[in-house]
Image (tube, rainbow, N blue to C red):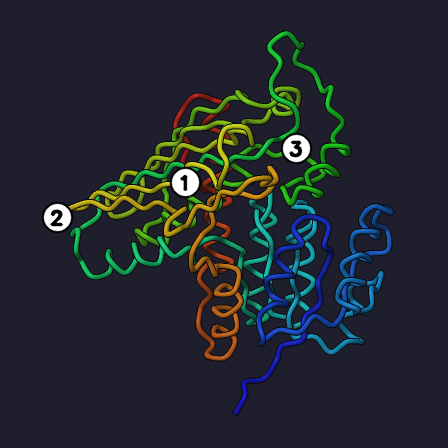
């Protein structure tokens, strides 16, 4: 027998449309309605309407009415980061399973609300992540086999080759000169992160390396020490947020973690960036290059937007909804659930606090 389909509502498509697109591409999920709150600005309604038009489904400016009227079982949340958790809580209270865009939130207290609502309503929650990158899956299999022994250290480099507006201009004074809303529009058009509040690289991309480190080690982070700076982009200088950071992590099982993260600009690299993880064990070591396996394609007249490095078997966006459907079918757990997402948000907040204070900070 064919397994049943899950009807889903896309609750706001103002940030990353690749999340609902990824879910809709899986044969177990069917988009039936786009919904958002009526008091959202025209720009938000316009983006929602475009997605609805692309999928030939209605757009309803009332979240609760859309959930009630369209018989949905799943909510896919991809609003601004500040609204992620509120929409997820409302979906959970309506009995829906939830796929939520990253970051989980820019406030740990909001993540706590989601954890409580998800567990009280006994629904499944998946936070979008990169843990099904082929290199990470192969590394996890090697670690589980015991090939390198007991892990005692892990290091991640996550340098992302995208711009965040114009490069840093050392001659400019430090003041908010780049308009936030204009930057938000620009970021959405490029498929990047933007929200009502400016977010640095730890909040925007920190989930990816921290989620993979958590998956590979099975260890939680207890204390962090961070150094942060605005090195590459004027928007980060103007808004007191970091685009470059180093973080030392004290983890369970006596594991020492280190993370280097930065948004290094599109001119720095022609593919997905320098994204590597190194794991040291009692019997050996692993070096994980997330860009591999890949092929490189070059030809005359190639547009600058066409990256020559193309991943092989890069089906992360398919395997995430596959994992989500499996969790619903079996009452199992997703690869990144609400509690894990909350722990990552708390680690990011501790790193930001440490970067400002210059002292180690315990993860709450």
SS under mark 1: strand
Q: Is residue 330 above or below residue 139?
A: below
Residue at numbered disc 3: 198
**How much space separates mark 3 and mark 2, taking CA atoms?**
44 Å
x, y (%) of residue 338? 51, 58
Residue at numbered disc 2: 283
Q: Residue 139's quadrant in the figure? A: bottom left
Q: Is residue 177 above or below residue 72?
A: above
**How much space separates mark 3 and mark 1, taking CA atoms?**
24 Å
Q: Quadrant of the C terminus?
A: top left
Q: Is residue 20 left or right of residue 278?
A: right
Label 1 packing within 10 angstroms: few (<14), some (14-19), many (20+): some
Q: Is residue 203 above or below residue 175?
A: below
Q: Residue at x 61, y 57 (%)?
A: 19
SS under mark 3: loop
Label 3 packing within 10 angstroms: few (<14), some (14-19), many (20+): some
Q: Residue at x 58, y 26 (%)?
A: 241
x, y (%) of residue 243? 53, 28
SS under mark 2: loop
Q: Which one is nearer the viewer's eye here, 268 or 16?
A: 268
x, y (%) of residue 240? 61, 23
- Nearer the N terminus, badge 2 or badge 1? 1
């Amino acid at each position: 027998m064919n397994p049943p389909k899950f009807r889903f509502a896309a609750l706001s498509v103002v940030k990353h449309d690749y999340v609902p697109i990824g879910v809709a591409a899986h044969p177990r999920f069917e988009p039936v309605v786009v919904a958002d709150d009526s008091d959202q600005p025209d720009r938000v309604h316009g983006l929602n309407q475009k997605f609805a038009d692309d999928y030939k489904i209605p757009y309803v400016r009332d979240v609760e009415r859309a959930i009630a009227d369209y018989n949905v079982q799943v909510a896919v949340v991809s609003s601004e980061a500040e609204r992620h958790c509120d929409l997820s809580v409302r979906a959970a209270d309506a009995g829906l399973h939830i796929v939520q865009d990253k970051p989980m939130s820019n406030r740990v207290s909001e993540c706590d609300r989601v954890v409580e609502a998800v567990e009280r309503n006994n629904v499944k929650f998946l936070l979008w992540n990169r843990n099904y990158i082929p290199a990470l899956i192969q590394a996890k299999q090697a670690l589980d086999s015991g090939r390198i022994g007991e892990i005692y250290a892990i290091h991640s480099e996550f340098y992302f080759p995208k711009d965040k507006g114009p490069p840093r201009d050392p001659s400019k004074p430090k003041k908010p000169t780049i308009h936030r809303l204009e930057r938000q529009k620009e970021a959405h058009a490029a498929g990047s992160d933007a929200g009502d509040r400016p977010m640095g690289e730890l909040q925007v991309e920190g989930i990816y390396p921290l989620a993979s480190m958590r998956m590979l080690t099975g260890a939680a982070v207890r204390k962090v020490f961070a150094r942060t700076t605005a090195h590459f982009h004027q928007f980060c200088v103007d808004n007191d947020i970091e685009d470059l950071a180093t973080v030392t992590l004290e983890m369970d099982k006596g594991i020492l973690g280190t993370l280097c993260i930065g948004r290094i600009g599109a001119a720095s690299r022609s593919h997905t960036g320098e994204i590597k993880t190194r794991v040291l064990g009692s019997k050996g070591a692993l070096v994980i290059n997330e860009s591999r396996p890949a092929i490189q394609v070059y030809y005359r007249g190639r547009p600058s937007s066409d990256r020559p490095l193309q991943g092989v078997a890069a089906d992360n966006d398919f395997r995430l909804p596959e994992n989500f459907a499996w969790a619903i079918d079996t009452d199992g757990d997703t690869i990144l659930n609400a509690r894990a997402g909350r722990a990552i948000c708390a680690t990011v907040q501790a790193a930001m606090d440490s970067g400002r204070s210059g002292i180690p900070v315990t993860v709450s």
